């Protein structure tokens, strides 16, 4: 561990080579010092001065006063400097907040031109000072949270009137972060990447580190009984009190994908407990009127969801493949038959939600995710067992998907399942569906401001299909009107943009319990929510991106179709 003084010196050296003085009437230099032991919200002090040395020494003295009151230990250290300031009226600020998605306001705020009362963007967002609740989609001043954090930062000093009589000042900051290892990390300044470290290159090694981190977090959320700690709202360390068994099973699937890369023993132990919980506590078996034995995942409100059985298939098939085990095959059969029983034999559509008590229909259609999940789950089971029943159900369902233009949903699960389907049935109609599922969605992938992790999954599943398509001379014409260059540009952009949803320590340190969320993934516009399925989708995306980075130009072979197979195809 590098001594704290040495880390301060490393931060000072970084600032000396990067920061420049502010113009009058502002202080020439203003530094924010943040420190935490990882167990409590960062303590923040700031100081300004007419020159670098004066401002730095004042800030270090204030920080040292706090450190002297703490137990000895390793501290995370971050230092930010103000690189720009702009005076605005309160009316202008509130107007700007109203135009900004909640938690996406990326400036600090000062209430006087000397910056005596000032907060960084990280302080504002981590303390929900600009968050009006889930019912308000834009940023808004939360007076109560402002008052609470002002007392934390400034003690008994009077809080500024809201609205203030004069102007306020929007602050652009940039910084450097140094953990006990002594390595300084430059912190991004303005823009959507603000607040986290600069990452020049997202290579396979760094992606693997993200997978290790996210999967380790999920493993730590598995309790002794196999259930997860479902999620956190980290601003005030509030646990999410609800539960969703579908997301439990799908999170186990993502953990298995990660374990395939990491082979981490603690992760495997957590998987074993969590998947046993699915089989023994969350799945219920039934006998249908025709005597068929089926099984269904039971969710909250005593519901059976089509997608619930699907993700159980995904998790248990993946387990059987990776562990070379047949332990779940009897249950997999019953879960698959449960899905098949939800298919309309005439149209091929799936019914989505049943009452668990009597298997009566509760909701014919709830969300298109379930359709893609069901088809993908059955295809993965087909890959394991080569039982033609499951492929037949999927092809019948795809007739319905195509007729009803399901590609317009641009759903990531549909991307997964059409990629898998074209491995076994490399037909033009299926390839066209897969291309349509992404072709006119690329601008959205490039421009979406939220991290939206399932977009990376969508793109990478489609990329696998594209690889095979390019290797098939009789199918290459399908790409004539497809913007391949834009596709790969969008894929790379989305992979890099997901770094903004990772809880780097330099971001986690401002929340109530940094160590509890450090190394996880979050959804910024949902109050920085960290929920198992949020982490799951980031994790699956990065696992697939790691595979993409390592793949050779040689594409996987397509399973050839027999003449008998071809004669069964009726979709036009």
Image (tube, rainbow, N blue to C red):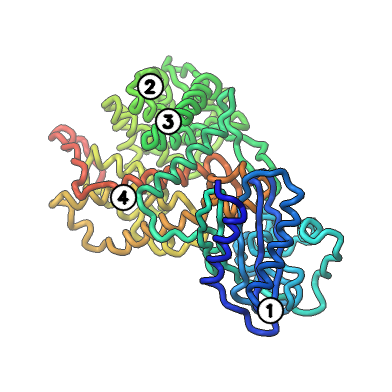
Label 3: how many Cα within 10 Å (few below 14, some 14–19, many 20+): many
> In the rendered structure, which disc, 2 or 1, sits on the residue that comes first in sequence?
1
- Quarter holding residue 83: bottom right
Residue found at x 62% / y 32%: 301
Circle 4 SS class: helix
Marks 3 and 1, how far apart at CA: 61 Å
Q: Which residue is mark 3?
A: 315
Q: Mark 1 or 4 closer to N-term?
A: 1
Counting residues from the start of the chain, the first of labels 4 and 2 encountered is 2
Label 4 Cα crowd, 10 Å radius (few <14 / some 14-19 / many 20+): few
Image coordinates of residue 372 in percent, x first then y, are: 40, 41
Q: Which mark is residue 549?
A: 4
Q: Please give the residue where the numbered disc 2 appears in the rendered image.
A: 333
Residue 450 in percent (x, y) is at: 52, 58
* Mark toward the viewer: 4 or 2: 4
Q: 570 or 278: which is nearer to us?
A: 278
Q: CA distance from mark 3 to mark 4?
A: 24 Å
- Of the numbered discs 3 and 1, the one sitting upstream in the chain is 1
Q: Is residue 441 visible?
A: no
């Amino acid at each position: 561990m590098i001594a704290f003084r040495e880390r301060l010196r490393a931060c000072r050296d970084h600032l000396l080579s990067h920061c420049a003085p502010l113009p009058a009437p502002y202080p020439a230099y203003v530094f924010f010092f943040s420190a935490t032991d990882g167990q409590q919200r960062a303590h923040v002090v700031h100081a300004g001065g007419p020159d670098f040395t004066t401002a730095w020494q004042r800030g270090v003295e204030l920080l040292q006063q706090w450190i002297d009151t703490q137990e000895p230990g390793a501290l995370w250290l971050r230092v930010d400097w103000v690189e720009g300031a702009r005076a605005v009226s309160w009316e202008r600020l509130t107007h700007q907040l109203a135009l900004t998605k909640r938690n996406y306001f990326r400036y600090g705020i000062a209430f006087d031109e000397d910056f005596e009362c000032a907060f960084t963007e990280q302080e504002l967002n981590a303390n929900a000072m600009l968050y009006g609740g889930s019912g308000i989609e834009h940023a808004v001043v939360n007076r109560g949270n402002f008052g609470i954090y002002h007392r934390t930062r400034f003690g008994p000093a009077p809080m500024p009137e809201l609205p203030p009589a004069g102007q306020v000042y929007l602050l652009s900051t940039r910084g450097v972060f140094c953990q006990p290892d002594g390595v300084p990390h430059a912190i991004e300044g303005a823009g959507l990447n603000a607040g986290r470290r600069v990452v020049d290159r997202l290579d396979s090694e760094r992606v693997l580190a993200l997978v290790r981190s996210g999967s380790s977090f999920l493993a730590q959320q598995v309790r002794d009984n196999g259930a997860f700690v479902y999620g956190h709202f980290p601003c005030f360390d509030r646990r999410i009190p609800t539960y969703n068994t579908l997301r439990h099973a799908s999170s186990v699937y993502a953990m298995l994908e990660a374990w395939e890369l990491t082979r981490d023993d603690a992760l495997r132990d957590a998987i074993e407990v969590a998947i046993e919980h699915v089989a023994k506590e969350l799945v219920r078996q039934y006998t249908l009127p025709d005597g068929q034995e089926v099984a269904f995942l039971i969710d909250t409100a005593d519901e059976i969801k089509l997608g619930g059985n699907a993700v159980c298939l995904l998790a248990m098939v993946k387990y059987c493949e990776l562990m070379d085990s047949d332990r779940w095959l009897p249950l997999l059969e019953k879960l698959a038959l449960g899905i098949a029983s939800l298919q309309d034999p005439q149209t091929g559509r799936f019914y989505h939600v049943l009452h668990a008590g009597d298997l009566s229909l509760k909701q014919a259609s709830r969300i298109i995710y379930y359709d893609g999940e069901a088809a993908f789950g059955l295809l993965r089971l087909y890959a394991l067992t080569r039982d033609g029943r499951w492929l037949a159900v999927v092809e019948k369902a795809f007739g319905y998907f195509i007729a009803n233009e399901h590609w317009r949903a641009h759903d990531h699960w549909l991307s997964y399942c059409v990629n898998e389907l074209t491995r076994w049935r490399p037909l033009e109609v299926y390839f066209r569906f897969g291309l349509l599922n992404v072709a006119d969605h690329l601008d959205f992938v490039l421009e979406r401001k939220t991290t939206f992790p399932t977009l990376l999954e969508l793109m990478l599943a489609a990329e696998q299909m594209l690889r095979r398509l390019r290797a098939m001379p009789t199918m290459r014409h399908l790409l004539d009107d497809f913007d391949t260059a834009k596709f790969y540009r969008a894929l790379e952009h989305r992979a890099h943009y997901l770094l903004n949803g990772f809880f780097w320590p330099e971001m986690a340190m401002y929340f109530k319990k940094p160590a509890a969320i450090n190394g996880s993934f979050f959804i910024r516009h949902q109050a920085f929510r960290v929920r198992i399925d949020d982490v799951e989708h980031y994790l699956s995306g990065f696992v697939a991106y790691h595979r993409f980075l390592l793949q050779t130009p040689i594409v996987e072979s397509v399973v050839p179709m027999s003449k008998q197979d071809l004669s069964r195809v009726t979709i036009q």
